[in-house]
Amino acid sequence: MEAIARAGSTILGAVGKSDQRLRRDVRESLMELFAILDDWCEMAEETSVFLAPGTNPRDLRIGPRQMHREVLPSILGDIDRVYAEKAPILLRWRASKRRQAARRSLRTLLKIYCPDLFDQVVNATEDRAEWILRYKAQVAAIPKSEEEYRALVDDAAVTTRALYAARARLREFIVATYSISDIEPAAE
């Protein structure tokens, strides 16, 4: 926890010296990334319920949302957009400013100041995406072999725990880095 707080204060110090708007943008990007991970965890939990021992998935009449064709590309696209937020329109007109803004992305900041956190989030989301792609057909068909079913459930549990751990660590980082007073009230 102390390392997370130090990394957060380092980011705020670097960003605070440069631009308050950038500081707000980083906070909003982190919160958006947390919200995406939270949705991802919710869907992983649905999958766990669907695959729970003693539950006959065929009786549920609906598969987990995570297995729907359009969900995975949508979530991965959302995560990528958060990491590489587009530069404001005025900066996009000039190539040098556009490249400069791209280098100040959330991906770059996390890679520099919190590489462990960045790697944990990336690994958790990539592992879950691979699990979905690997087992998509099996979840739909529900394996008849006990061994295949066990592998399906065990791998789901491993990737679900990794998502929960990444979300918890990101939450700790946000809380240690920003206070609630940093959030601006909505315009009236």
Image: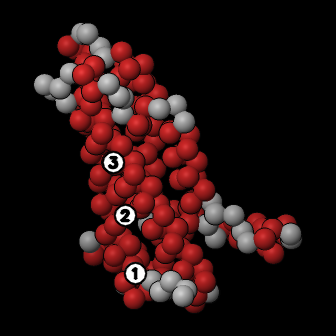
User: Tag 3, which secondary structure?
Assistant: helix
Query: Which part of the image, by quadrant, shows the N terminus?
Result: bottom left
Q: Residues within 10 Å of mark 2 (few under 14, many from 20)?
A: many
Q: Residues within 10 Å of mark 1 (few under 14, many from 20)?
A: some
Q: Earlier in the sequence, mark 3 or mark 2?
A: 3
Which residue type does callout 3 highlight?
Answer: Glu
User: Tag 1, which secondary structure?
Assistant: loop
User: Tag 2, which secondary structure?
Assistant: helix
Left or right: residue 63 versus residue 23 is left
Please say if the residues under marks 3 and 2 sit with CB atoms less than 8 Å apart: no
Q: CA distance from mark 3 to mark 2?
A: 16 Å
Q: Nearer the viewer, residue 1 or 22?
A: 22
Residue located 36% across and 43% down the image: 43
**Residue tagged by mark 1?**
178
Q: Is residue 119 visible?
A: no
**Residue tagged by mark 3?**
42
Residue located 43% across and 45% down the image: 125
The spot of residue 105 in percent (x, y) is 61, 66
Which label sits on residue 61? none
Toward the right, the furthest residue is: 94
The spot of residue 33 in percent (x, y) is 47, 60
Q: Earlier in the sequence, mark 1 or mark 2?
A: 2
Which label sits on residue 170? 2
The spot of residue 99 in percent (x, y) is 76, 66
Q: Residues within 10 Å of mark 3 (few under 14, many from 20)?
A: some
Q: Of tags 3 and 2, which is closer to the observer? A: 3
Q: Is residue 76 visible?
A: yes
Q: Is residue 19 above or below residue 116?
A: below
